[in-house]
């Protein structure tokens, strides 16, 4: 059964943009959420500011993308091969994609848990 409702919101790497914190915060214009995301996603190698947490979606040709997405090797590879997603590639899943998923899953999962905790406190 196909569970993907809006294929235009599926990034090259398979991330559902409509569940990506940067995309959602941009669409909803949630500046306080962008501050939280910037702090959570920053590490020793990459420091993010809230103003950088802006994304119109991976497939949006002219829209601003979060720096990580704009510079993403997986995204660039799929675009060069003219694929809508990496699922079309004969090399699927390649090492670049596996590493990206490993990195993203931890950070997005953390934001989801933080949001659940906030909702439980508010409710």
Image: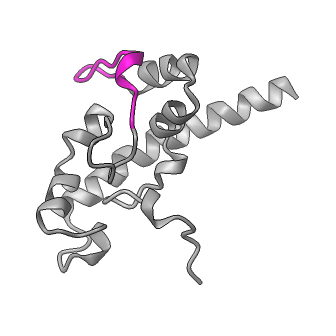
The answer to which quarter of the image holds residue 52 is top left
Where's residue 25, x and y in %? Answer: 53, 31
User: For the point 51% across and 37% down, which residue is it?
Assistant: 21
In this rendering, the count of numbered labels is 0
The answer to which quarter of the image holds residue 4 is bottom right
Is residue 98 rendered to the left or right of residue 106?
A: left
Where's residue 22, x and y in %? Answer: 45, 34
Residue sticking out furthest to the left: 80
Where's residue 14, x and y in %? Answer: 39, 61
Q: Quadrant of the C terminus?
A: top right
User: For the point 58% across and 32% down, which residue is it?
Assistant: 28
Query: In the rendered view, how is the structure colored?
Result: one colour
Is residue 50 rendered to the left or right of residue 94?
A: right
User: For the point 26% across and 23% down, which residue is it?
Assistant: 46
Nearest the viewer among 83 and 109 is: 83
Is residue 42 rendered to the left or right of residue 119?
A: left
Tell whether position 91 is magenta.
no
Q: Quadrant of the N terminus?
A: bottom right
User: For the point 72% across and 30% down, which residue is it?
Assistant: 117
Residue sticking out furthest to the bottom: 1
| In the depicted structure, whether residue 49 falls above or below residue 77 | above
Nearest the viewer among 77 and 98 is: 77
Decide whether the magenta segment is chiefly helix, strand or loop. Answer: loop
Tell whether position 51 is magenta.
yes
Residue sticking out furthest to the front: 62
Which segment is the magenta one? 42-55
């Amino acid at each position: 059964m196909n569970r993907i409702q809006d294929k235009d919101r599926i990034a090259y790497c398979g991330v559902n943009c409509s569940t990506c914190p940067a995309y959602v915060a941009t669409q909803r214009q949630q500046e306080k959420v962008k501050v939280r995301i910037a702090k959570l996603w920053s590490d020793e190698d990459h420091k993010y500011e809230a103003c950088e947490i802006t994304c119109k979606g991976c497939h949006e040709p002219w829209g601003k993308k979060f720096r990580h997405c704009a510079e993403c090797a997986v995204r660039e590879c799929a675009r060069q091969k003219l694929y809508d997603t990496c699922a079309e590639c004969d090399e699927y899943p390649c090492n670049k994609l596996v590493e990206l998923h490993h990195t993203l899953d931890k950070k997005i999962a953390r934001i989801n848990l933080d949001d659940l905790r906030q909702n439980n406190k508010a409710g």
